[in-house]
Image (spheres, rainbow, N blue to C red):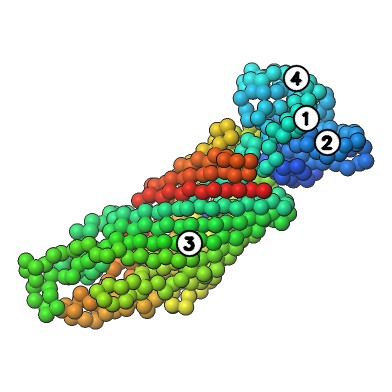
Amino acid sequence: MKQVVAWLLAGCLFWVGGAAGAFEIEGPPACKQCGMDRTTFAQSRVLLTYDDGATSGLCSIHCAAEDMKQHPGQKVTSFQVADYGTKALIDARKAVWVIGGKLPGVMTATPKWAFAKQKDAQVFVAQHGGRIASFSQAMAAAQQEADSGQAPHCACQGPGGLMTFNPAFGDDIYHTHPAGMWMFNYRYMRMDMDGLRDGTSDVAASSVGNGRGLPYDNIMMIPTKMTMDMHMLMAMYGVNDKLTLMGMLNYVENKMDMLMDMSPRDRKGNPRGMADMGAVPDEPMKTSGLGDTELRAIYKFSGVLNGSLGVSLPTGDIDQNYTSMGTVWRAPYDMQLGSGTFDLKPAITYSQLSDDSLWNWGGQAMFTLRTGKNSNGYSLGNSVKLNTWLQRALGPAAAWLRLAYSDTERISGYDPGVQKAIDNYNSMMWMTHYMAATMPDSDPNNYGGQRLDGFIGLSVPVGGMVSLGVEGGVPLYQNLNGLQMKNDWYCTVGLQAMF
């Protein structure tokens, strides 16, 4: 219930923020030439009208130059551009222009901004540099770039472009694309877990054992370290300027290092004495294969707000096994590859770009609802995840800080194959305890909890339509439901292409 309340509160906050932050523009929402969101770049947008009555909504004077090249012999009867300060459309021919300066331009390496008043242009030059120019000078520079092919032709370029489409590599921050635009993304993520934790307290491996009267007793297999490697392939397509469809596949590789404690008694129930080796390293447990598949539809409500609905398909195997002491056991819940259920994942995302296109900030709330029990008789816990970020453009690159909070419920039900070890242990006498591979991960109550993670990332262009990103993170707070492996660090690298 608390997850649902958090979800609703976050949704209300984002709706209010979206309503307050949105700037309504005229004409098409996306630039006719490059597909960029004209609301996001409202301070540089252009609206052209030709002598045949046709109009073109564009993001910048540079895309206007491209558009005019595609209308040879036609006269531009109206050339309107946004005033940098107020974002209101003005006559571009009468505007005061500033060329150059420290602020990144839109779809150009040489910025060009329009102002309705001379004094506003002078204040801008004093703050950011550049030189005062006429419309003919600004247009000549834009046309020269268009003729030389220097101006970029991809929505992943320009100030804030990387931020608009790529607010994080280590998580899925949902966004839309202009009609007809594709995006492909490959990411490799590693999550490292080291040591045990119960609630907010770390638990030493020496406090866990098998029949030794320790705080955490009757546990034969003691997890010490776990790594999860994920290879994720995502594709997105803009059906129209408001609706984008997404699909994502992933391949999972899990590895868990463990200690084995055979108990201080032998198979006849006699004390081992000096022969008692205590907890000794055992062969690592490994599972790998295709994970669950996600399909999602994302709808843009405004320039700063979108909502989406995802469906997770149970393509990940939940019957992964491992062998211990010559016996095949069902791998515990955290070593399985999927949920085994069809899961609903509604989300709402708020993303705002500053007027100078140097800063991007936002937040996202997503709820994961398990629709029932899987074929093995259990369901993973419902969860809510909240993300917030702050990004800064650094020339063509972008760097960001991100916080992610998650709250996950315990497992409902249990897998008889996993439960087998616990039931065998509880039903056998001391002399046969070593035959039951009990471990904390086999208990469905030892699952879920609250986590707060912090991340830092960087994204850089490596081509006209391709960007490379890396993000690293560490847990800032962990309050776990029962004895579990605790998260230690995260790292994600990815490659993204749009066309």
Sequence-wise, which precedes: disc 1 or disc 4?
4
* Residue at numbered disc 4: 133
Instruction: Choose between 146 and 469: the one closer to the eye.
Output: 146
Q: Secondary structure at mark 2?
A: helix
Please report contact status of discs 2 and 1: CB closer than 8 Å, yes or no: yes
Q: Residues within 10 Å of mark 1 (few under 14, many from 20)?
A: many
Give the mark toward the camera: 1 or 4: 1
Q: Amino acid at mark 1?
A: Gln
Residue drawn 55% across the image and 33% down it: 394
Q: Is residue 126 left or right of residue 495?
A: right
Q: Amino acid at mark 2?
A: Met
Give the mark toward the camera: 2 or 4: 2
Total residue callouts: 4
Q: Is any part of residue 122 visible from this angle? A: yes
* Residue at numbered disc 3: 251
Q: Amino acid at mark 4?
A: Ala
Sequence-wise, which precedes: disc 3 or disc 4?
4
Q: Amino acid at mark 3?
A: Tyr
Q: Secondary structure at mark 3?
A: strand
Q: Secondary structure at mark 4?
A: strand
